[in-house]
Image (spheres, rainbow, N blue to C red):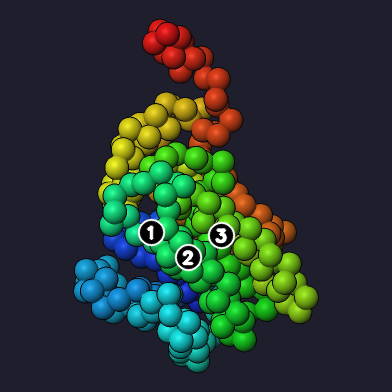
Amino acid sequence: MSFLGLSGKTFLVLGVANKKSVAWHVAKTLEAEGAKVVYSVRSQARLDSLKGLLDGKPTYLCDLEREEETVALATAVGREHGPIHGVLHSVAFANFSRGMQPFHETTRADFLQATAISCFSLVELSRALKPHLAKDASVVSIGISSQVTAANYGYMSPIKAALESASRFLAKSFSADTRVRFNSVNAGPLKTSASAGIPGYLDNYLHAEKMTLRKEALKTQEVADTAVWLLSPRSSGVNGQGIIVDAGMGLNFFDEELVKASARLL
């Protein structure tokens, strides 16, 4: 038996977009530990793009913007694969079809749609899955630090902050009659396909690398490893927490090299 104790357990993973995504790194690590992984992707088009990764694996289609599809997903997964020992929620959506706008120019429709998909879907899915979860299941969401205020993150930063808060409230709410745990992993900048489409992201990523204590960028697998630990019974004492994984970036504001570089610009 491995240290993490995941062998023979069943996990639902949402949010695999490609082999660079956090969700895929989590899923393949769970499988390497002997766990069974059930996948959910948002559309047939996304599933078609994942041929070669998800071939032969139990996979369901679910548009988390639609409550009826979320309920149907929970019912089907619970009936066919339950009990579910853990859930990974690695979902984010924002409509930047107008290009990147200042936060105060965000439209109500865009903000509410992004909130529904990226945040409230965790609440809706957890409610629907509750009858199918193992008594000591773990639910982990992937977010970013609420301290991040990079302009090119747009309105995703406050929505991910809401996701972290929602996870805490779910931990409290579920504790009334279950031992199900809820935690979030709040990651620093990563080199993923989704981030590559954000204007100016590369500059932020390179700056973040210089701000880490080790002067080396955060790796997607490092975020995934934290999530897998939280999904495992080895983290049984951790509940309602937001775990920051950023290689020390968030506490290194006054890094000597960066301070000197800034002074040279004055």
Q: Is residue 252 above or below residue 143?
A: above
The answer to whether the residue labelled 3 contacts the one labelled 1, judged by CB atoms less than 8 Å apart, is no
Taking the image as drawn, is residue 177 in sight? Answer: yes
Residue 172 in percent (x, y) is at 73, 67
Residue holding disc 3? 163
x, y percentage for residue 19?
29, 58
Q: Is residue 146 left or right of residue 28?
A: right
Mark number displayed over residue 94:
1
The image quarter in which residue 62 lies: bottom left
Q: Quadrant of the N terminus?
A: bottom right
The residue mark sitting in front, 2 or 3, is 2
Closer to us: 40 or 25: 40
Where, by quadrant of the figure, is residue 20 drawn?
bottom left
Q: Nearer the viewer, mark 1 or mark 2?
A: 2
Label 2–label 3 contact, CB within 8 A: no
Which residue, given by chain and number where applicable, does mark 2 sit on? 112
Query: Looking at numbered disc 1 in the image, what kind of residue is underneath it?
Result: Ala
Residue drawn where x is 73% and y is 77% of the image: 178
